[in-house]
Amino acid sequence: MGKHKGERAASSAQAEDKKSRKKSYEKQLARLQVELAHLQAWVKKSGARIVVIFEGRDAAGKGGVIKRITERVSPRVFRVVALPAPTDREKTQIYMQRYIAQLPAGGEIVIFDRSWYNRAGVDRVMGFTTEKKARRFLELAPRFEAAIVESGTILLKYFLTVSEDEQERRFRQRIDDPVRQWKLSPMDLESYRKWWDYTRAYDDMIRMTDSEHAPWWIVPSDDKQRARINCISHLLESIPYERVKFDEPELGKRQKRPDDYVEDKTPRKVVPDVEW
């Protein structure tokens, strides 16, 4: 009897701790999202150009971090770029060409949900490019990024890591949950099977493209909430923005209803109210 009572007490304590942790996370996230709004105002006023690259293991939580960064700001300032596989025409272009077209103009922040580093990761591991082209890319990428930084653009690169066990847990969660199944692609399954091929490729990539002007920042993400808070905090600390005074507009007076206005009585279809 005492054993069951102890188990219930432990379970209750765990639930309370989880609830407290979630509350703390939501408080921190709300604070950071306010700062992202201030960053947005500064970017618009100053004409700054910012590029943020997110790379990492499949199921490491890149989408979750990006969602929390962008959900309270304008998509006209924070623009997310997640390019599909190249078209036949794009395959004949210089490799960087379609990425260059996505770089920000003044007053924009471009977030790459995967980037030109596809060539060093999935393309290389899956044989979508030759080993010679992959090596050449790794040699040229730091020079390309130096040109971006020298132009006055702020460039931040984040790589999210996840353990083998946690990645498998998340993949199985996607398999079992209908609202997550769309996240599981054939490439995800290959990344699971080829864990060590990807490990070697990513080690190579980070070693060869980590530079003083564009370093890689590693984000451990077995704990998704901690990864989001850490990453957004670092992003904000890495940009020398200032708070911009908000010019509060005058709403003015709403016009009066015209004396000659007659309400339209034409039947209209209204979405029914659902009980919940």
Image: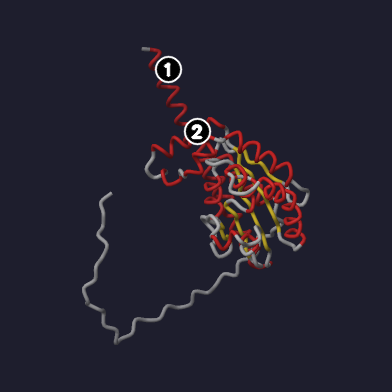
The type of residue carrying mark 1 is Gly
**Helix or strand or loop: what does disc 2 sit on?**
helix
Label located before the other in sequence (2 or 1): 1
267 to the left or right of 245: left
The type of residue carrying mark 2 is Glu
Look at mark 1 in the image and give the residue it sits on: 6
**Helix or strand or loop: what does disc 1 sit on?**
helix
206 to the left or right of 168: right
How far apart, in angstroms, are the residues tagged by discs 2 and 1?
A: 32 Å
> Image point 70% across, 45% down: which residue?
216
Q: Viewer-nearest of labels 2 and 1?
A: 2
Using the rendered view, name the quadrant where residue 38 is placed: bottom right
Q: Nearer the viewer, residue 61 or 245?
A: 61
Q: Position of residue 276 (x, y in %)?
A: 28, 49
- What is the total number of numbered labels drawn onto the structure image? 2
Q: Nearer the viewer, residue 34 or 153?
A: 153
Residue reaching furthest to the bottom? 260
Quarter of the rendering occupied by the N terminus: top left
Q: Position of residue 52 (x, y in %)?
A: 64, 54
199 to the left or right of 72: right
Q: Nearer the viewer, residue 264 or 205?
A: 205
Q: Are marks 2 and 1 in contact (CB under 8 Å)?
A: no
Q: Nearer the viewer, residue 235 or 251?
A: 235
Q: Position of residue 226 (x, y in %)?
A: 58, 39
Near mark 1 (Cα within 10 A), the count class, few <14, some 14-19 or many ≥20, is few
Above or below, 107 against 259 in this view is above
* Colouring scheme applied when the structure was drawn: secondary structure
**Which mark is drawn over residue 168?**
2
